[in-house]
Image (cartoon, rainbow, N blue to C red):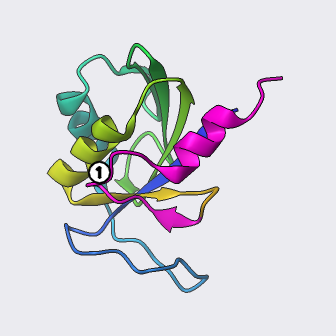
Amino acid sequence: MSWRLVVFNFDGHPPPDKLNTAFRPRTMGPAGWVRDSISSLLSDVAWSDPAQGTFDGGEFSMWFRLAAADGPIDRVEIEVMGDGNPLPVLALLCQVNGWFAYDVGERVFLDPDAEKAQGWEAQKQTPKA
């Protein structure tokens, strides 16, 4: 199983409590800038193509997906697998850029100050097929 997140730009302001169909995220910037922002904090991200990157955090791995290889980006999809704790890496990535990560399974924004994320912990408890 993997843990799915979507990262949005809120320029450091608190996100809404819930996402709804009227939600329109702010642009994060051009695709190149978003890739550079991710890579400047996680220097080992391998961009297999301009819209997909992977990061090996040792005890966990992250896959980054941008909606396009170029042009403005309004979200980054992240998939996490493994046993380690990816929350510090996600929190740093979000805090530096004014972004917030949304846990797709739990339907909540992550608390960047929390030590654990409920969705990540639940994913680790799910039996591997």
Q: Residue at point 28% right, 69% down?
A: 10
Work out which quarter of the rendered image holds the C terminus and state it.
top right
Quadrant location of residue 109? bottom left
Q: Tell me residue 90's x, y (percent).
A: 33, 42
Above or below residue 67? Residue 110 is: below
Image quarter in which the N terminus is found: top right
Identify the magenta region: 107-129
Instruction: Give percent across and percent down for residue 16.
Output: 40, 80
Question: Element under label 1?
Answer: strand
Q: Residue at position x 77%, y 24% from top?
A: 128
**Vertical arrangement, residue 92 with respect to residue 12, above or below:** above
Q: Is residue 54 visible?
A: yes
Residue 43 falls inside the magenta stretch: no
Quadrant location of residue 53? top left
Q: Position of residue 100 (x, y in %)?
A: 34, 60
Disc 1: CA contacts within 10 A as few (<14), some (14-19) or many (>=20)? some
Residue that badge 1 annotates: 30
Judge by depth and name the residue closer to the eye, 42 or 75. 42
Residue at (52% x, 23% y) in the render: 83
Drawn side of residue 31 relative to residue 80, left or right: left
Tally of numbered tags = 1
In the image: residue 104, left or right of residue 56: right
Front residue of 82/125: it is: 125
The residue shown at (32%, 53%) is 114
User: Extreme top residue here?
Assistant: 58
116 drawn magenta: yes
